[in-house]
Image (spheres, grey):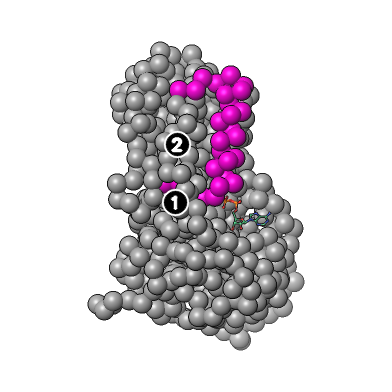
Amino acid sequence: MGKAEPPILASPACHSTFDTVAVEHTNRGALTPTFIAHWINGQLTPSQSGRISPVFNPATGEQTGAVGLASQSEVDAAIVSAVDAGRDWRRTALSKRAAVLFAFRELLNQRASELAEIVTAEHGKVTADALGEIARGLENVEYATGVPNLVKGGFSEQVSTDVDVYSIRQPLGVVAGITPFNFPVMVPLWMCANAVATGNAFVLKPSEKDPSASLFLAQLWKDAGLPDGVFTVLQGDREAVNRLLTHPDIAAVSFVGSTPIARYIYETGTANGKRVQALGGAKNHMLVLPDADVDMAADAAVSAAYGAAGERCMAISVVVAVGDIGDQLVEAIATRLPKLRIGDGSDPDTDMGPLITAEHRDKVAGYIAAGVESGATVVVDGRAADVPADGFFLGTTLLDHVGTEMSVYTDEIFGPVLCVLRAETYDDAMAIINSNRYANGVAIFTRDGGAARRFQFDVEVGMVGINVPIPVPVAYYSFGGWKASLFGDQHMYGPEGINFYTRGKVVTSRWPDPAESTIDLGFPRSR
Ligand code: NAD
């Protein structure tokens, strides 16, 4: 890989209706304009469905591409190649599968900056943040390189006279991943690294809002030696998703996205006999006890609330200040906000980029208006911020004295809006947090180890940070919330990811002397 690599993204052929899409610009130079294709059987395959969705650079507001949306028959055709490829792939030796994972890891590492550029161009997050999501995704690939060890079974000798028992884990077949816009690299890697390593064929349906990173990943898999058809990308919307949820050859579905869709995916997928893990939305609280270091808590709140413009499922969107720390904390957060530089994520001086679409920006602004109307105190109003005129920008908002009945509190906003709630005691704060319908991540800031230990025990949330605002587990643990943040039993990646993509089989074996054979109608028991 010493030589300069050609751009991976461009599709070789244009969609027949593409010329009608007014796309003149892109900041991806040679890739102008882009029709974003599927990746089927190891090749870019432009959709013939006649349905497309525009793709924007959120920092400029310009349309940079169009993605073809799969029809039902395109989904069916892709699954045929995935079934074929999966049949051979599960027979491939574990050591050879691990070698592909190692090669993929190397390529991803080498080409991270190109991939980050694509993420920034379509998502809007700053390049350092895009590199961060790639690094966290890479951890999952590294974990999956250990697949020979991860799928080891158990063996018990002589469970009965001359009888041995052993357990093995086998792949499911073809599994699908349906992913959100906010992590176009990391979330697909949460899924595909373990799914492929364990011997499945994987079909990715990325978000139609930033679909190009998926094709870059597909090319890297191919370059790493993954056989054609084992990794497929189907671009699409609800139509593609519905076909994946009902297709008889899809054995399991991993989903990450908003709660209403997660619930729908879980109910529809399981009703069609599939194994489903569906991760939904979030409203993550940060509990700040009176003994916390105010500056440290304020730094953490600002970083976790406004990073990626709040478009993270693990973003802190609520601070619950206990006792008399509230006033100091709000002031400390407010003084930090004017220093954040808002602009194009590809500018290395930018701290916070735009939101994903104009529509989403307007929705977030609507929540701020509703918060003001319902009586929250506006400390900083992002709608009044001095932000670039083009693009889907919104400044940072800080609302104080927010009530639990207000929509800014009850709903996931998914934007740069931080709500502060006041609580008199730890118990009051815990009652607020444990009553929330979401339960993805949570954090406590304190210097009291006993209080932190109690919090970790009491809190009804799936991922807990102690003086850590964004407690995304490392790849050898598993990721997942509780309540409306997760539908299904298995969390994503790590040991639960390996379990999700495999099924257990137990073999009982005996090699008797035929001369000793008898008929025995009794139920088998140990002898
Ligand atoms: P989304 O639910 O709108 O879309 C997610 C995926 O579902 C996309 O691939 C989309 O094409 C598909 N989809 C959308 N509407 C559909 C429908 N009606 N039928 C079938 N499929 C449909 O989510 P998003 O806006 O892309 O992402 C943001 C959401 O994802 C937030 O709610 C965020 O909290 C959540 N999220 C959760 C986690 C987590 O780990 N819990 C991680 C990242 C993002």
Q: Residue 41 has which mark?
A: none
Q: Nearer the viewer, residue 224 or 315?
A: 315
Q: Does residue 72 appear to the left or right of 232 in the view shown?
A: right
Count of numbered circles on the image: 2
Answer few, some or many: residues within 10 Å of disc 1's Cα (few below 14, many 20 plus, some between 14 and 19): many
- The residue segment tinted magenta is 352-379
Task: Return the x and y of residue 74 as percentages of the image width and height.
Answer: 66, 75
Q: Does residue 106 appear to the left or right of 287 in the view shown?
A: left
| Residue 455 can be seen in this image | no
Residue at image location 48% in from the left, 28% down from the top: 381
> In the image, is residue 229 part of the stretch drawn in magenta?
no
Task: Return the x and y of residue 383 as percentages of the image width and height.
Answer: 50, 33
Q: Does residue 144 appear to the left or right of 430 in the view shown?
A: left
Element on which disc 2 rests: loop
Q: Which residue is mark 2?
A: 395
Task: Return the x and y of residue 64 as percentages of the image width and height.
Answer: 50, 63
Q: Residue furthest left?
A: 2
